[in-house]
Image: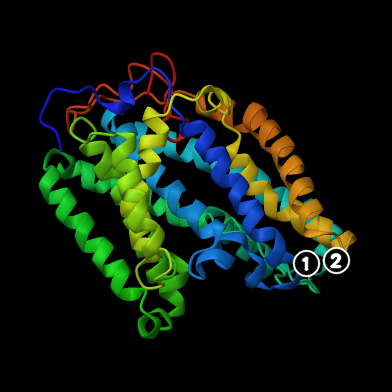
Amino acid sequence: MNPAPNPSPAQRPANGIGALRLLFASLVIVSHSPEMLDGNLGREPLHMLFHTLSSGGFAVDAFFLISGYLIAASFAASSSVGSYFMKRVLRIYPAFVVCCLLCVFVVAPLAGASLQSLGPADWGRLGYRLVLLKSPEVDQAFASLPYPTLNGSAWTISYEFRCYILAALLGMIGLYRRRGLYMALTAAVVVSSLVLSWPGLAAFKSPGWLVASLGEPHQQLRLLAAFMVGTCFWLYSKDIVLRGRYAAVAALPLLGLMFVPQVAETALILLGGYILFWVAFKVSWKPLLTINAKDDISYGVYLYAWPIGALLIWYWRDIPVGVLAGLTFLGAVACGLVSWLVIEKPAMSWKWRSRRIQPRIDSPAILKQGNLGPDADVRQGEA
């Protein structure tokens, strides 16, 4: 920490958030491609190296770190709680709903499912899952593949939205004003996540009703821990010194701890979080500051990668894994671009007018300059 009046990193006119989000969405494709072919995790690149986390798990944790940073900023800048939730709904639901409908009405029939066989209860279940931001399920779709699911990546979306709800609740009770208390709460969540990750507890089966409404507790705690750590980086953004040599120092123990299954993810969230935000706000490499900075297609890439990859395998069973990953990436980028231009960007431009509420905290001016990415709804003149 440094008490000197350094400007917040987020006040920089450009940053690498957009490029990093696209990179992490691409890592999910790299991670899933070999396992989707035959169900064998052993060929996954990061898992082969550390035998703990996969590239997909690494990417998801990074996504939640970034979201925690940006969503707290969005709440602080929102004129009302209603405005905050409207922005969150418009950012998540339209693209998710369109992707799910395409999965049901286009992908499922191409993957061997018969929509005519679905009864009222099946359609009701699909609608229920859509409202709760759960990936669609249609019987017989991709039935002979190792993972017979229409969209195996979309499971994280409902967890993220629950983090959005908690972020608002914590802001409404003024916890962002009490940074020490928020950090203590974050530490409790991180420790709880660490405890639940131990083999004996991780195998514990939660009640079905709890999973249906709130997801798997150990997964929710894991992702919430990353989200809240990201928020802590935002709360202390004016105090944390982001420097390359500190990032290098953080990288050394991180590399060692990544080999330890019980603490790998916690180390990634804490030490890797510092490295992540140093790269995002301090590295001035031009491609990092420009790629995916204006039109953020990462959400669409993440949503469409799995159904594209599954269809490629369905119609080309012996497709080489490198070809699978490459074609999936190209298809997902194309779909992500269309999703951004046709669905996400127009939805984000809708206005929500309501009575202004008393601000919960003093926002550290992060919305006056630059683009923090779509999670924070940062647009010129509005947040």
- The quadrant holding residue 337 is top right
Q: Residues within 10 Å of mark 1 (few under 14, many from 20)?
A: many
Quarter occupied by residue 67: top left
Q: Which residue is mark 2?
A: 112
Query: In the rendered image of this protein, does residue 124 appear above or below residue 359?
Result: below
- Toward the top, the furthest residue is 381
For the residues labelled 1 and 2, say whether their Cβ atoms are less than 8 Å apart: yes
Q: Which mark is residue 317?
A: none
In this view, the residue in front, 139 or 261, is 261
The scheme the figure's colours follow is: rainbow
Of the numbered discs in the image, which one, if any, rests on residue 141?
1
Q: Is residue 227 visible?
A: no
Disc with the residue nearer the chain's start (1 vs 2): 2
What is the quadrant of the C terminus in the image? top left
Q: Residues within 10 Å of mark 2 (few under 14, many from 20)?
A: some
Residue at x 41%, y 26% (from the top left corner): 352
Position of the N terminus, as image quadrant, is: top left
| Amino acid type for the residue under numbered disc 2 | Gly
Where is residue 334? Give x, y as percent.
74, 35
User: Quick one: SS at disc 2?
Assistant: loop
Number of residue marks: 2
Does any portion of residue 31 appear in the rendered image?
yes
Which secondary structure, mark 1? Answer: loop
Please name the residue shown 78% across and 67% down the image: 142
Report which quarter residue 197 is drawn in: bottom left
Of the pair 129 and 32, the residue shown nearer to us: 32
Relative to 373, does residue 127 appear above or below in the rendering? below
Q: State the residue at coordinates (64%, 72%).
A: 42
Tell me the CA gap for discs 1 and 2: 5 Å
- Of the residues shown, which amino acid type is indicated by label 1? Ala
